[in-house]
Image: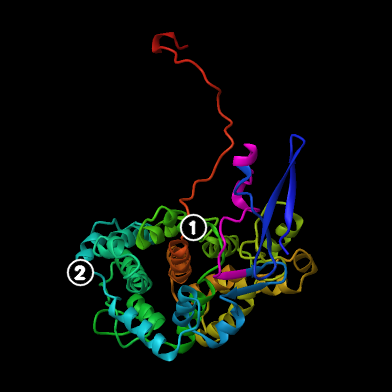
């Protein structure tokens, strides 16, 4: 049964239809509101506005549910891999063995950058942030593939695979450049995440780094857990740019720029900056937590609680187990990691934090893991972008496949000056 909602404006009722999602979510369809009444809705931050219908990811923040295409995130984390999950997000179903082999082969075939792109890297200053390089180089890569526009639908599978594969190559190259190290090319014999670690950490061409299974698994898990997360800032940006019929690479590059913001992709970086601040104060975390509880210095506990998840972050529960395995295997002596474990223990057992649902979230554990395996702080958001790429591609594909989609064009409530006459320069005081 289709329900309607009645709205009364200036004493006149108007009926608006509702849209019900497959999980029972109800949305009020206001697409005809302005034509019928001259009014629009105002929702800063879009916290109560559905910008689209999507079949990709479902989140129930009240109960801690995250599903990709109907599959629970815990089951995917246990049984799947990042690349299999990427296929699931983009194409809607888990791949058969032949489909997965074909997808993996296309990734391998497209992992090399056009040699001309090496010269682009040389023009960035050593101080360039990896996210600036990543967004610019994704856009630059599109210029080497003119059929991104001319044969958009026909070539989509190849461009999607090319983008997923090359984003980690660009990321590794930018890291090596910043460190003044020689470029390491990908190896066809290595799988996706192992290949990325090889390009990042091999000492020099011809000498491969040691690839520990627990490390590879941990990073693959970070990528998988970040692969999509509904209509967040960067994904909404990708969809908005796609609505103009921009190409896949341009839309993904815009997503990288949105993700770069400290309120979005920089959360795990903020965790490590907090730990560094605590360490510099000569504190083991005790004084800091007391300040948080007493609200005496407005100290912020980064990496705890979540805007969407009101009880617990299901991704954090999964990543904590892998975090413990990584730290156990590496036997690293790191004061920041010691502080992190102290904060975690207190937050999980202290009534103050439990009652406020300030549990460690996915950013807390991903930050700890990445520091432990040697990924520098300014590369944290890049790791996020690599993981999120399949979700962006899936959302781009959804926009392009929707025959009813229109270019995104939000309205506004104007609050500036009313009409006024032009004043000559000599008459202005």
Task: For the N terminus, give its image quadrant.
Answer: bottom right
For the stretch drawn in magenta, the main secondary structure is loop
Please say whether residue 52 is one of the residues in the magenta stretch. Answer: yes
What element does badge 2 sit on?
helix
Mark drawn on residue 299:
none
Horizontal relation, residue 103 to residue 408: left or right: left
List the single residue furthest toward the bottom.
Answer: 97
Q: Is residue 40 visible?
A: no
Residue numbers of the magenta segment: 35-58
Choose top left, top right, bottom left or bottom right for residue 137: bottom left
User: In this rendering, is residue 279 above or below 157?
Assistant: above
Q: Position of residue 73 (x, y in %)?
A: 59, 78
Circle 1 sits on which residue? 404
Viewer-nearest residue: 396 or 116: 396
List the single residue furthest toward the top.
Answer: 427
At a point 32% along the width and 70% down the height, the residue shown is 154
User: In this rendering, is residue 378 above or below 418?
Assistant: below
Q: Position of residue 46 (x, y in %)?
A: 61, 51
User: In this rendering, is residue 42 above or below 277?
Assistant: above
Q: Position of residue 33 (x, y in %)?
A: 63, 44
Please say whether residue 169 is one of the residues in the magenta stretch. Answer: no
Viewer-nearest residue: 53 or 207: 53
Q: Is residue 261 visible?
A: yes
Q: Are marks 1 and 2 in contact (CB under 8 Å)?
A: no
Choose top left, top right, bottom left or bottom right for residue 327: bottom right
């Amino acid at each position: 049964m289709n329900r309607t909602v009645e709205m009364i404006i200036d004493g006149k009722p108007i009926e608006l239809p509702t849209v019900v999602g497959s999980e029972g979510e109800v949305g009020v369809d206001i697409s005809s509101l302005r034509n019928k009444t001259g009014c629009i809705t105002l929702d800063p931050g879009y916290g109560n506005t559905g910008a689209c219908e999507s079949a990709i990811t479902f989140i129930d923040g009240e109960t801690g549910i995250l599903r990709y295409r109907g599959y629970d995130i815990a089951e995917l984390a246990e049984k799947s891999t990042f690349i299999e999950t990427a296929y699931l997000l983009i194409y809607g179903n888990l791949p058969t063995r032949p489909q997965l082999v074909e997808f993996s082969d296309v990734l391998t075939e497209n992992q090399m950058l056009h040699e001309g792109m090496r010269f682009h890297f040389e023009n960035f200053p050593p101080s360039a942030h990896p996210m600036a390089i990543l967004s610019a180089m994704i856009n630059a890569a599109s210029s080497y593939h003119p059929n991104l526009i001319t044969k958009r639908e026909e070539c989509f599978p190849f461009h999607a695979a090319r983008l997923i594969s090359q984003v980690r190559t660009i990321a590794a190259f930018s890291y090596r450049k910043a460190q003044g190290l020689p470029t390491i090319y990908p190896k066809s014999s290595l799988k996706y995440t192992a290949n990325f670690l090889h390009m990042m950490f091999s000492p020099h061409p011809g000498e491969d780094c040691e690839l520990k299974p627990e490390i590879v698994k941990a990073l693959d898990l970070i990528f998988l857990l970040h692969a999509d997360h509904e209509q967040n800032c960067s994904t909404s940006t990708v969809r908005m740019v796609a609505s103009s019929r921009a190409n896949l690479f341009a839309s993904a590059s815009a997503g990288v720029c949105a993700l770069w913001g400290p309120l979005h992709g920089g959360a795990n970086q903020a965790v490590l900056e907090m730990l560094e601040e605590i360490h510099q104060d000569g504190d083991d975390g005790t004084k800091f937590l007391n300040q948080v509880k007493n609200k005496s210095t407005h100290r912020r506990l980064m990496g705890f609680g979540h805007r969407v998840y009101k009880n617990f972050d299901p991704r954090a529960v999964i990543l904590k187990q892998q975090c413990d395995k990584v730290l156990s295997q590496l036997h690293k002596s790191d004061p920041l990691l010691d502080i992190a474990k102290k904060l975690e223990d207190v937050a999980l057992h202290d009534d103050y934090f439990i009652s406020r649902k300030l549990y460690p979230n996915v950013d807390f554990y991903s930050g700890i893991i990445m520091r432990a395996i040697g990924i520098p702080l300014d590369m944290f958001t890049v790791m996020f972008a690599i993981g999120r790429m399949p979700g962006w591609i899936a959302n781009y594909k959804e926009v392009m496949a929707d025959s009813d989609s229109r270019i995104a064009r939000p309205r506004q409530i104007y609050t500036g000056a009313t009409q006024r006459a032009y004043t000559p320069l000599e008459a202005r005081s």
